Image (tube, coloured by chain):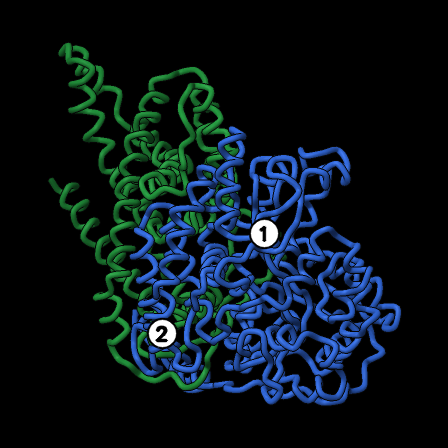
Chain colours: A green, B blue
Amino acid sequence: MSDPVTLTTDHPVQAAATPPARGRSRRLSDRWLTVAFISPALLLLLAMSVFPLLWALYLSFTDYSATRGGSANFVWFENYTAILTSAQVHMRALTTLIYVVGAVALQIVLGFSIAYLISRRTNGRGLLTTLFLVPMMLSPVVVGLFWKFMLDAQFGVINSLLGSLGVGPVEWLTRQNTALISLIVVDTWQWTPFIMLIALAGLTAVPKYLYEAASIDRASEWFRFRTITLPLVWPLLLIAVLFRAIEAFRLFDLVYILTSGGPGVSTETLSFHVYKVAFLGFNTGTASAYGILMVLIVIVLAQLYMRYLNKLKED
Amino acid sequence: MRYPKRIGRLSVAAMLLATAVACGGGADEGATSAPKAPADIPELTKDPLTLSFIWFDWPPAHALEAFANAEYTKGRSNVTIKVNTVPNANWHDAMFTQFAAHKTDFDIPILDSQHIGEAVTNGNILDLTDFVKKNIDVNAYNPYLLAAYGQYPQAETGKRDENASLYGLPLLGDTWTMIYRKDLIGDNPPKTWDEMISVAQKCQTDNPGVSGLAFHQANGSDAAAVTYNTVNGIYGGNLWDPKARKINGIMNDAAGQEAMDVLVNKMKPLTAPGSGNWFIDEVNAAVAQGKACIAFNWIAASGGLLDPKQSTLGTTREEILGKLGFATLPSQKTDLVPLGGMGMHVSAYSSPEKQAEALNFMKWFEQADVQKKWAAAGGVPSRTDALQSPEFLNAGPFNKVYTDSVSRMRDMWNVPEYARLVDIENTNVNAALNGAKPPKQALDDIAKEQQAVLDAGSGKGGGGL
């Protein structure tokens, strides 16, 4: 029998005092720990998001009404057919399209311009950026309410201002040709800062040496903007367009507060129409199908857009 | 790794199973008819209890809470009354989304008279017929008022079907009053609708900056619809044939078209630019700021006009009253006026203790002396004795207008499809008033679309579009 081997260590005393770590219970394997940590979030997601979506999908094939109760009879694709062939829906889709294109285009032009101007400043850039971000931090309902007061034809500050310049009162919210423009202007006021922020991030990331090289080549300001700034910031702007377009597509709050969809139904967007179908007539089946179709449209368009972005990146 | 995949599959399977179970159990739970309230009030609790109402946010709601907490609690000291309010535009949704969930945070919903059909057919409110027979003196009311705030199927205008069921009792009576500037058009209000228009026209011409008329035109709630319905009634039109459930061809008949023409081509030009989204508050603001010669508004919302703090017409109530007059609506081919106001009902989903308390409150509220106190507190009662009492007639200069208007009232439809019918009418009348649609087309669209709503059977897809 040999003598026990003496352990040599730099800290023999400490090593002797610390007991060896206990082996982890077999139940607490890495896999189980992973499951344990992910489960709460996963369950929440399933309960709050996936389940309602599946439930809405089921209801979209029925004639169910939340208030009338009774059995949910399957009507299969009748809700979808009715929505896709409805002149009322086509009208709201056109309104939504005009709104999305108008608002997002205006926001891109203004947001990028402001970001470009701010990026060229060296002093006070942080303060300016913060000030420009304020509208984005407000609730759309609050924004809608104070713009409603400002745009009021009789008592609003905008018409008062125009009056002092000799311009007659404009019916901002009650005329067909101005109501949608007013919505676009208010949305632009609130969300231009978002585009500005993303554009500013892109502009800051453009390497300085490219501009220096262009300067050495005596390139004009416009040439530098066209060949260096815009191509490098463009992909980021396109991502911002995607976010804003999705947001604008589901516009509800500003319409609800500012125009209630009027005059008549001329500013009713798809989301506002879904709300009426769901909560005025409580046609839950139709409203579910309407909602599902809107989600599908957003997913399909977003996918096509992402493919375009990827192609742009590869090129 | 196989495990996450398995977890993912299990999760999806669980969700599908849950959906399937929910589909089997949730959607087909139906309530089809209103449960009955007992004829006798059950024993009341002695424990602290909060009796909750739901209404929209306007002065009578606050007056009711103050009045009930001051008076009802004298006999029921363990009870607190809470009147929850929501914006007018959300009123219907706030009540019916809770009804849809079969769980309400209110015990007494204050329904517009036209909401009754929807609530009754869905089984959301109690059938009070037996309770009313045992506890309420029905002869104390104008029969139509009792019917309008509680009866379903709807009563014929001016009448009550004594065999029909009652689901509510009057809480607040109301109708439109004509508010006119005595200092601008004289002490005598116009007697006919045509005369009213010509007086407003002259007043507008003579007083630059003051518009001839102010009335509800908004496309939210029932604003523009009530305005059209009022003119429609005055010019001899009808909204529908209830027995045949026919709207198309009736609403847009010659009388209906004349009413739309009067509204859009004769009245609208006398309103202020940009007034196409005005409702109660905006009309009151125009009157209080001296910007309208003649205005139309609900009586229950007119109290603020006499508050010097809110008016530029005078520094005292008397001074304001020297300039403002209140009159019943002018007549033309008929003398019909719109029925406003609301009834109180009992939620079918409240606890038995709260339902018992609600019934007790209703019985208390409909007593003669309480109705007079309610009148003195700013409410508009429905009992005939209260309507003719000095407490009511002296409480406001517009109260006599209500008393004089009771026999002239006409309501809209109170069918379950009401919310959709009124939205169709609101949006189309609003479109016509704001130049977004020719008046005739707007009227034809109303008739056609409303008829389609009434004709739509169940079991078809695409309902509600």
Please name the residue that numbered disc 2 is placed on: A285
Q: Position of residue A62 (x, y in %)?
A: 33, 79
Residue B297 - label: 1
> What chain is tagged by disc 2?
A
**Quadrant containing the N terminus of chain B in the rendered view:** bottom left
Letter of the chain that mark 1 sits on in the rendering: B
- Image quadrant holding the C terminus of chain B, namely bottom left
- SS label for mark 2: helix
Q: Is residue A148 left or right of residue A120?
A: right
Direction left: furthest residue:
A315
| Residues tagged by mark 2 and mark 1 found on one chain of the structure | no
Establish if A135 lies above or below A204.
below
Closer to the eye: label 2 or 1: 1
Name the residue at 66% across, 49% down: B326
Residue B266 in the figure: left or right of residue A217: right
| Kind of residue at disc 2 | Gly
Instruction: Residue A34: give x, y in percent of width and height.
Output: 43, 65
Residue B48 occupies quadrant: bottom right
Q: Residue at x 23, y 38 (%)?
A: A235
Say above or below: B236 vs A253.
below
Pick whichever, B12 or B156, lies toward us. B156
Q: For label 1, count other residues whose C-alpha is less than 10 Å away and answer few (under 14), some (14-19) or many (20+).
A: many
Q: Residue at x 59, y 56 (%)?
A: B176
Quadrant location of residue B361? bottom right
Q: CA distance from mark 2 to mark 1?
A: 38 Å
